[in-house]
Image: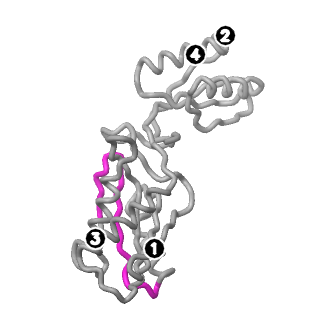
Amino acid sequence: MEIEDDSRAIAYTTLAEGPDFRHELEIRRSRFITVLRRSPDEETARALVSELRREFHDARHHCSAFVIGPDRMIQRSSDDGEPSGTAGIPMLEALIKRETTPGATDLSDVSAVVVRYFGGILLGAGGLVRAYSESVSAALDLAPLVQRRRLRLCAIDIPHAEAGRLENELRGAGYVMAATGYGAKHAVLRVALQDESAAISEAHARVASLTAGTAVLRPEGTEWIDVPH
């Protein structure tokens, strides 16, 4: 379980769990290969740059940008030899200004690296800004995204024979289920709830109704959990 943090955010958007996402554009003969990685910390983000430097060792530039944390407090970028301000900053702006839902710009825990193979035609400062920004934006258009929400976890101790039925009932009622554990005597279902007293009270009543009062919710703190975007 994750440790509770001091973030004021209750939700943000990030990449879905899975392999790095890749997308390539050709702009005036230059190849721009964008790689996106879900990055919960700076170490993970910087590792992507190092890995791509080895993979694309003959490329001229490996420009990067990343934004990290529920409140997006960590933001870094690098032009990696391109004229100052023409690569890293446009890439970072493509991340932080990304509208994930109408009116919401909350993308975080994402690192982007754009590998450029020079095609022999100079793009100029304005052309470079557009190329690097477009490269990241085009990748985000296709990348799988999820909403990550800080939810209140509650556990339910239930006999093994009843666990499947109760879990199905709760899922059917729209509850987000976290990991289920299985002990020698009973199963432990975990429900992720909005961290609000009304939502928790409603869940208590629902569980009591579904189990004829034999099971209760046991609080287990909060955790950041992926939910469908």
Q: Tell me: 14 left or right of 121.
A: right
Q: Looking at the image, is mark 3 or mark 4 nearer the viewer?
A: 3
The residue drawn where x is 30% and y is 38% is 8
Chain-order first, disc 4 or disc 1: 1
Q: Which residues are magenta?
A: 57-76
Could you say whether the residue bearing mark 2 is in a helix, strand or loop?
loop
CA–CA distance in space, label 2 to label 4:
10 Å
Q: Which residue is mark 1?
A: 33
In magenta segment, residue 73: yes
Amino acid type, callout 2: Ala
Q: Which residue is mark 2?
A: 212
The residue drawn where x is 66% and y is 28% is 167
Amino acid type, callout 4: Arg
Q: Residue furthest right?
A: 161
Residue 100 versus residue 51 in the image, above or below: above
CA–CA distance in space, label 4 to label 1:
50 Å
CA–CA distance in space, label 3 to label 1:
15 Å
Residue 206 disc label: 4
Could you say whether the residue bearing mark 1 is in a helix, strand or loop?
strand
Label total for image: 4
Amino acid type, callout 3: Val
The residue drawn where x is 40% and y is 86% is 119
Chain-order first, disc 3 or disc 4: 3
Q: Looking at the image, is mark 3 or mark 2 nearer the viewer?
A: 3
Could you say whether the residue bearing mark 4 is in a helix, strand or loop?
helix
Chain-order first, disc 3 or disc 2: 3
- Tell me the quarter of the picture where residue 113 sits: bottom left
Q: Which residue is mark 3?
A: 129
Amino acid type, callout 1: Ile
